[in-house]
Amino acid sequence: MANVRSLIENPIIDTIYGKIVDLELELTRLSKTFKSKHPKILQINSELTRSRKRLDQEIQKEFENLKSERKVLVAREKTLEKTVSEFESDALDSSTKELKYTILQRNVTTSQNLYDLMVSRVKESNILQTSDTSNIRLVEKAVIPIAPVSPNKKRNLLLSMIVGIICGAGLAFFLEYLDQTVRTEEDIALHFNIPVLSVIPEVET
């Protein structure tokens, strides 16, 4: 009974339940003094029977009310699930439409840019075709050269010969300057600062 009262909040049931508890306590107290056939005990038993029957009736009513409320809540839950499903479907459809719109808008922008570019190119071509070219005059007729402008082989060969001769002579003088080889008596005397003795050749008789 305590579990049922914890699930059902009804002041009538609480009152009847409290009355039953009081009657049971009173019956316990009187049973210690009187026998089971005593009028007071019979009266309390009768009140207990009526109270318990009424309590069962009230509990049954509450169960019926709870069943009805449960049905209402289940119906509301189904309605909410259907509404949420419709909202999700609409949101998905909106996202798909928005994506398609973005793609179409991008294609339109690209096509517009290409069109503008083509129009500008066509206008430039028309301007070049219709422009006045009367201010152009021929200054000098182009002449095809007989020989290549560069390289000038003859001049390069002459310059290379002159530069080779100069470098060769300079190198010869530089090597001669670096050469310290002693070959004659004059070289020895010059190198060691020794006077040179005149040698008179003998005359044959």
Image (cartoon, rainbow, N blue to C red):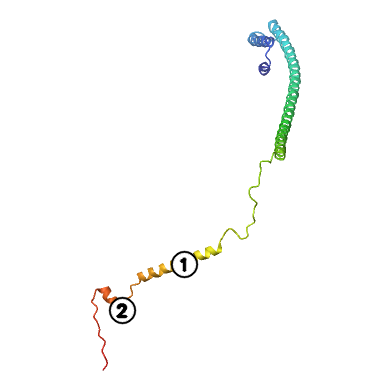
Residue 172 placed where, x, y %? 40, 70
Residue 135 placed where, x, y %? 66, 41
Residue 116 placed where, x, y %? 71, 34
Mark 1 or 2, nearer chain start: 1
164 or 27: nearer the eye? Answer: 164
Residue 19 placed where, x, y %? 67, 9
90 or 55: nearer the eye? Answer: 90
Residue occupying image coordinates x 75% and y 21%: 79
The N terminus: image quadrant = top right
165 or 36: nearer the eye? Answer: 165
Residue 18 found in image quarter? top right
Height in image: 53 above or below 127?
Answer: above
Q: Please tell me how crowded label 2 is: few (under 14), some (14-19), or many (20+) other residues with Cα within 10 Å.
A: few
Q: Which residue carries the number 1 mark?
A: 164
Q: Please tell me how crowded label 1 is: few (under 14), some (14-19), or many (20+) other residues with Cα within 10 Å.
A: few
Residue 59 found in image quarter? top right
- In this rendering, which labeled residue sits more in front, label 1 or label 2? 1
The C terminus: image quadrant = bottom left
Is residue 145 found left or right of 73 in the rendered image? left
In the rendered structure, which amino acid carries the disc numbered 1?
A: Gly
